[in-house]
Amino acid sequence: MDVLIVDDDAVTRLALSAALEEWGFVPILAENGEKALKKLEVDTAPHLLIIDWSMPGMSGPELCKTIRKREDGQFFYILMLTGKEGNEAIIEAMEAGADDFLNKPFDHRVLKVRIAAGSRIVRLEQTLNQLASRDALTQCWNRRMIDELFTTSIAESARKRSPFSIMVVDIDHFKVVNDTYGHAAGDVALKHVVNILNTNLREYDQVGRYGGEEFVILLPATDQNEAWGVAERVRSAIQFQPTLVGDDVSIDLTVSIGIAQYDRGRDTNQNTFFERADQALFTAKRSGRNRIVC
Ligand code: GH3
Ligand code: MG
Ligand code: MG
Ligand code: MG
């Protein structure tokens, strides 16, 4: 687990960093609050922090307040490590948002158990996030999360004035798969489809399970023609890579796909935009399945 050490004193940073490495953590260093905040902006940001109180520029408590104000759904565990002593300092630090408080010079054994306690909370938070955002069967985003990403993607495409498309993918005659091979084989087929989706999409595309055998895919910076290319790659990969269930049983699947490109003038909100992709899917189904409609 990564731990962000924020301290203006180079000797303290080094000492903490050596201790953390010895305990199996990966130390990340920042010499002031501003640099620390930068390190928290990325998706892979550390969630366990050791923060000094007195630093040039932003103080430890100010940094805590800023982090708490910014954190939006995610949680950072903050241990304030300071030379300031006494109950007033503890109260001020924890009112500013620190989760724990320890005095310098610190006893290595005490710091070790405090960090272990913090890392338990960070792991718990990661588990909760995973449960709240991922589909348990396929591990792609769940409906709640893909809806949230959908909203932010529309806002981002408007801000960047870049195209944005979505695909709604529905497995054809999936009920027959369940009826013929059983529900467990159906589950294997769903995982297989998500694997194919993941290998045929780009890193910044997002896949969510919207309903039983229906998936929504967000394609940022993609216009309708490019989306068609992606959809065709997905459609043919699913058709030509059957799902293996058991030793000699393989299930042939096809999907129907509806595509829509976001149109600021026409799509008054997220729902009307989604409706257009869903209507296109309906047309694909009605006109014979295993096809793409824009
Ligand atoms: P269409 O081509 O019109 O989409 O037909 P369909 O049979 O795929 O559509 P329908 O909506 O009638 O049936 C969807 C089926 O998906 C029925 C349901 O049992 C199955 N299903 C939904 N969720 C799961 C799941 O988690 N596991 C399995 N194995 N089956 C599921
Ligand atoms: Mg200091
Ligand atoms: Mg279906
Ligand atoms: Mg369906």
Image (spheres, rainbow, N blue to C red):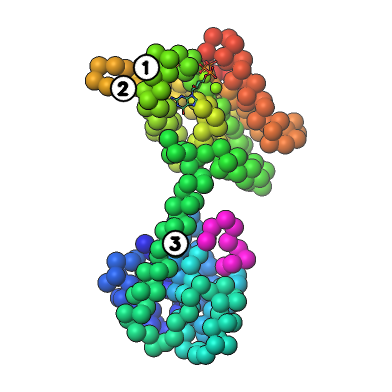
- Which residue does the numbered mark 1 point to in the structure image? 181
Location of residue 102 with respect to 44 vertically, above or below: below
- Which residue does the numbered mark 3 point to in the structure image? 122
- Judged left or right of residue 267, residue 105 is left
Dot placed on the residue nearer the N-terminal end, 3 or 2: 3
- Give the magenta range: 67-75
Where the C terminus falls, by quadrant?
A: top right
| Label 2 close to label 1 by CB (< 8 Å) | yes
Image-quadrant location for residue 244: top left
Which residue is rendered at x = 71% and y = 30% of the image? 272
Image-quadrant location for residue 269: top right
Of residues 150 and 249, the one drawn nearer to the viewer in this rendering: 249
Say what amino acid the circle numbered 2 marks.
Answer: Val
Q: Secondary structure at mark 3?
A: helix
Pinpoint residue 121: horizontal percent, then vertical percent. Answer: 44, 63
Pinpoint residue 44: horizontal percent, then vertical percent. Answer: 44, 56
Which residue is rendered at x = 74% and y = 31% of the image? 266
| Residue 68 colored in magenta in the image | yes
Give the number of the mark in front: 2 or 1: 1
- Which residue does the numbered mark 2 point to in the structure image? 245
Pinpoint residue 157: horizontal percent, then vertical percent. Answer: 63, 42
| Residue 202 colored in magenta in the image | no
Q: Secondary structure at mark 1?
A: helix
Q: Separation of disc 1 and disc 3 at Cα?
A: 42 Å
Say what amino acid the circle numbered 1 marks.
Answer: Tyr
Location of residue 170 with respect to 84 vertically, above or below: above
Q: Separation of disc 2 and disc 1 at Cα?
A: 9 Å
